[in-house]
Image (tube, rainbow, N blue to C red):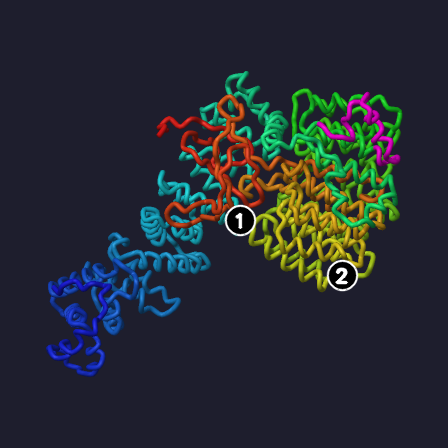
Amino acid sequence: MAPTPDPNSVGGGARKDEASVNVPSKDPKKKDDKKEDDLSEEDLELKQNLELYVERVQDPNPDLQRAALESMRQEIRASTSSMTSVPKPLKFLRPHYGTLKAFHQTMPASDLKKCLSDILSVLALTMSAEGQRESLSYRLIGTEGDIGSWGHEYVRNLAGEIAQEYTKRQSEEAPIDDLMELVQQIVAFHMKHNAETEAVDLLMDVEDLDLLLEHVDKTNFKRTCNYLTSAAKYLPGPDDMLVLDISYMIYMKFEEYPNALQIALFLDNTQYVKQVFTSCADLLRKKQFCYMIARHGITFELDDEMVADEDDREALQDIVNNTKLSEGYLTLARDIEVMEAKTPEDIYKAHLLDGRASSGASVDSARQNLAATFVNAFVNAGFGQDKLMTVPSDSTTGSSGNWLFKNKEHGKISAAASLGMIQLWDVEAGLAQLDKYFHSNDNPILSGALLGVGIVNSGIKSDCDPALALLGDYVDKEDSSVRIGAIMGLGIAYAGSQNDQIRSKLSPILNDAKAPLDVIAFASLSLGMIYVGSCNEEVAQSIIFALMDRSEAELGDALTRFLPLGLGLLYLGKQESVEATAEVSKTFNEKIRKYCDMTLLSCAYAGTGNVLKVQDLLAQCGEHLEKGDIHQGPAVLGLAMVAMSEELGIDMEIRSLERMLQYGEQNIRRAVPLALGLLCISNPKVTVMDTLSRLSHDTDSEVAMAAIISLGLIGAGTNNARLAGMLRNLSSYYYKDASLLFCVRIAQGLVHMGKGLLTLTPFHSERFLLSPTALAGIVTLLHACLDMKPIILGKYHYVLYFLVLAMQPRMMLTVDKDLKPLSVPVRVGQAVDVVGQAGRPKTITGFQTHSTPVLLAAGERAELATDKYIPLSPILEGFIILEENPDYREE
């Protein structure tokens, strides 16, 4: 038996001459003298030994055969351990591959034949022609032994061949049992050797992910699930749901409940959410789950199975109902020291501009005051105090009523409702403040107060349903502005709650022949919000009938857009479930048919990243149409809605929107800025900011207005200094144009929203979960912006308040077991994608250490900088409960 050669040794130059002298000429064919000159002694010896074995294998004597095969096997095994280059034995055996193959066919079936099959299977690694899958076919007739011993590369190659063979057999409907046995072995090998990603890939190829459950263990389940969940974004349906199902089961198996809950929320599967609660016994952990559900914004009732003790259940239901949000937000504001109320002038910073802008302020004072109302509402949102609306009435500056009356008729609606925004999430204080307007005889003020009640209750649920009690009676009043205030208020307060009491109030309005169009439009929208993503048949029916009853003239009205949108919201993110309704929509009047079709398609696939739907929508945007068609607007928005789910999709979408700006028709150009605003909402990317800045000076005022509003959206709640500067310059550029100036003011209010503590992004939990109510609010505003003049610049400017559904504090607040704030050091930095990386890579880069509560910008992640506490959720966002670490020792 020859000495095992070192696979990494290089045939050194020093030995070349001695090698050429001492060559014993066993080799009868002296053809390759030259080649032999280049080999070192050991290599040469190995080559000759191997050639000898090849001859002996063909010997009639079985003992000689067995010995030769055994030696050959050991040579190959010893060398496949390190895979830096083709191992020597494989290299030297290449010329004999054909001989051995031919001999293998003549051999009778025996153990020896199986041994030779093993060796041929390994040789096929370097020798077999593309697509022949010889390595696999020899493996299947070889010995049953351990395949791992032939090395990693071999197992990898086999896995690739199995995937191809599987597809072939599936198409021929041939049996696959022998393949599955091999798959079992390979998966076990991969899982032991930290190659979880490869094991998952193989199982996806052979469509048998259930095998994973047997092979995951404590050490590798996190990495496996991490890979599964991030792969799900790129898989076609229904595979993506299957993959998430498996990872949910794995998380449950290892009691990693917070992650399991996230997947349950992603799948929108209430049974799974219940299961998480019933499987977990620890009350503190359940509190953390409740915070996660509250952040996601779904309505969820705990029952006695989930939490046995009644007092505990009430405490937990309080968290789910989000009653703690206002308190946490104000804690953050005090910690960052921004409680001081700001006035619109503090935001405009007119003194930084040269003279002409400030002199033009007298243009349209009612419009300017209306803008100031919104800026004031957005900037002081949730702080409970400001300098326009909540001023004590006896103070020297005049009563709070004064600001109200500085607004014209419909302006008073927004002014009164802004009080609700300032008291956001603080239901008791908000209702007390709004109460005085309920006694007003002025309809717009009453309407605004009703809307304000809805805004205060946004995202906060309560057992006594204050919003329904206050607003319910006003839905059927005479005055249409009062009705709209009540309807929109209900839509905002109960978004996502699927509350049947409200349905029985609003549905009749849709089919009431006497109701004005605007009331019907807002009723449809509110029903869409309340039943968002529920696919509710009855609501869909009512809206469809309302659409069919519209006359030609009404179909041309801008507000009619809200009917298809209300319908679309019912199917938000629900993919195929929309198809029946989409069929019905093909029977509508041709004026609205395509608009409805695009809206339904874009809502149903929102946040799914479905490539095929992106192509469908792109095809619609590519057509050059006559003037009257309006359906391309929602198609462009739809592109952004579908693609916004992951970074790669966003980048590709931004590129294709750039193309549309160059080649698209005017109505497409008007929607592109809004789509960009949605893709990067609350995430001011420099490239997008520059594009929008360019468009904000566009000759077409509609494009410019959309771009300006989008500048506000991408910077929403970031206080971005560069954006603030751009908007200030725009305000002096457009100082004579009242409507554009109004848009600039709104954008300024958005950028400084909540003094920089809020975000509008509908995604949370490291961009994994998409909150349906938040997306519904944003999409509604964008649809309204497709036709600015009659809606936002007309008398329906209060549509802007739908954004409240997406407003969330961008904070991370740590609390102790009694839910009291607890300050601990955390590191905040840019999140790094570590899926499938070896070892324990760092999850954040370029971090700074702060003490909680902290703000998280887009794409940032936090991790605790101390071992003293253990967080009860792996993703540090929102409210995080900390548990003391029992193993912690003070240094």
Q: Is residue 544 visible?
A: yes
Q: Magenta segment, which residues?
A: 385-412
Q: Is residue 582 visible?
A: no
Corner quadrant of residue 885? top left
Whether residue 400 is in magenta: the answer is: yes
Q: Are marks 2 and 1 in contact (CB under 8 Å)?
A: no
The residue lying at 88 percent from left, 35 percent from top is: 409
N-terminal label among 2 and 1: 1
The residue lying at 68 percent from left, 51 percent from top is: 675
Which is more toward the observer, 101 or 373?
373
523 left or right, relative to 64: right
What's the mark number on residue 474? Answer: none
Amino acid at circle 2? Glu
688 left or right, relative to 844: right
Which secondary structure class fits the magenta region best? Answer: loop
Query: How far across and how far down the image is residue 60, in percent?
Result: 13, 69
Q: Quadrant of the C terminus?
A: top left
What's the mark number on residue 233? Answer: 1
Amino acid at circle 1? Lys
The residue lying at 76 percent from left, 63 percent from top is: 624
Residue count near mark 2 (Cα–Cα under 10 Å), binned few <14, some 14–19, many ≥20 = some
Q: Single out the mark in the foreground, 2 or 1.
A: 2
Q: Quadrant of the N terminus?
A: bottom left
Residue count near mark 1 (Cα–Cα under 10 Å), binned few <14, some 14–19, many ≥20 = some
Residue hosting label 2? 665
Is label 2 in a helix, a strand or a loop? loop
Query: How far across and how far down the image is residue 130, in percent?
Result: 38, 68
